[in-house]
Amino acid sequence: MAAPDCTTNESRDWARRPGGMLFWWVLPILIGASTYVLNLSFAADAFIWAGAFAWMGTGCLLNARRCARLHCFISGPALWLGAIAAALVGSGIISGPHALSNVVSITIVLAMLSCVPEMIWGRYARQD
């Protein structure tokens, strides 16, 4: 007779573990924020943010698959859109005096707002 599966959505959720949270979300935010003090070129700043958003978006999408975290289903694509937009800013396709700061701000706000559905429908899209 097989042992029962003791794992739950919460036990698989990287966002509920300090190591997962640090690796997937805190570290890329710190790397992105470091662009404000490193005196890099505008394009380098944009591409660093693009990488940071892609890193976080990948973490969210993998976490959504692992544990069905509702926030991650929404923030993963939002972060990837931010990564694409930041890369477009870095390559000069999107331009403007505040293009990068707008992309970064909007992406972070959208990721934060993706927590609202969890307040309404619960933390996980499906309960194990």
Image (cartoon, rainbow, N blue to C red):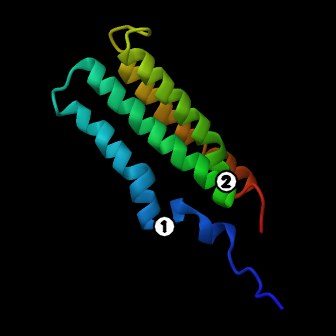
Residue at the front extreme of this rendering? 1
Q: Residues within 10 Å of mark 2 (few under 14, many from 20)?
A: some
User: Residue placed at 75% from the left, 54% from the top?
Assistant: 125
Q: Which residue is drawn at 58% across and 41% down?
A: 76
Residue at the far bottom: name it.
1
- Give SS at disc 2: helix
Q: From the viewer's side, name the closer residue of 55 and 75.
A: 55
Q: Where is residue 5 in the image (x, y as percent from the top left)?
A: 74, 79
Left or right, residue 103 beside residue 119: left
**Quick one: 1 or 32, which is closer to the camera?**
1
Q: Nearer the viewer, residue 5 or 110?
A: 5
Height in image: 4 above or below 99? below
For residue 81, which quarter of the picture? top right
Task: Say if residue 123 shows up in the picture.
Answer: no
Q: At label 2, which amino acid type do we have? A: Arg
Quadrant in the picture for residue 3: bottom right
Q: Name the residue under label 1.
A: 17
Spatial separation of the CA atoms under disc 1 and disc 2: 16 Å
Task: Check disc 1: other Cα within 10 Å, few if <14, some if 14-19, many if 20+.
Answer: few
Q: Where is residue 127 in the image (x, y as percent from the top left)?
A: 77, 65
Q: Is residue 118 left or right of residue 43?
A: right
Eye-nearest disc, 1 or 2: 2
Q: In which quarter of the image is residue 36?
A: top left
Instruction: Please tell me which residue is depicted at 61% across the width and 72% down the height of the picture.
Output: 11
Kind of residue at badge 1: Arg
Relative to residue 118, is residue 77 depicted above or below? above
The structure residue drawn at horizontal position 17% and vertical position 33%, both measured from the top left corner, is 38
Element marked by disc 1: loop
Question: What residue is pinned by disc 2?
Answer: 65
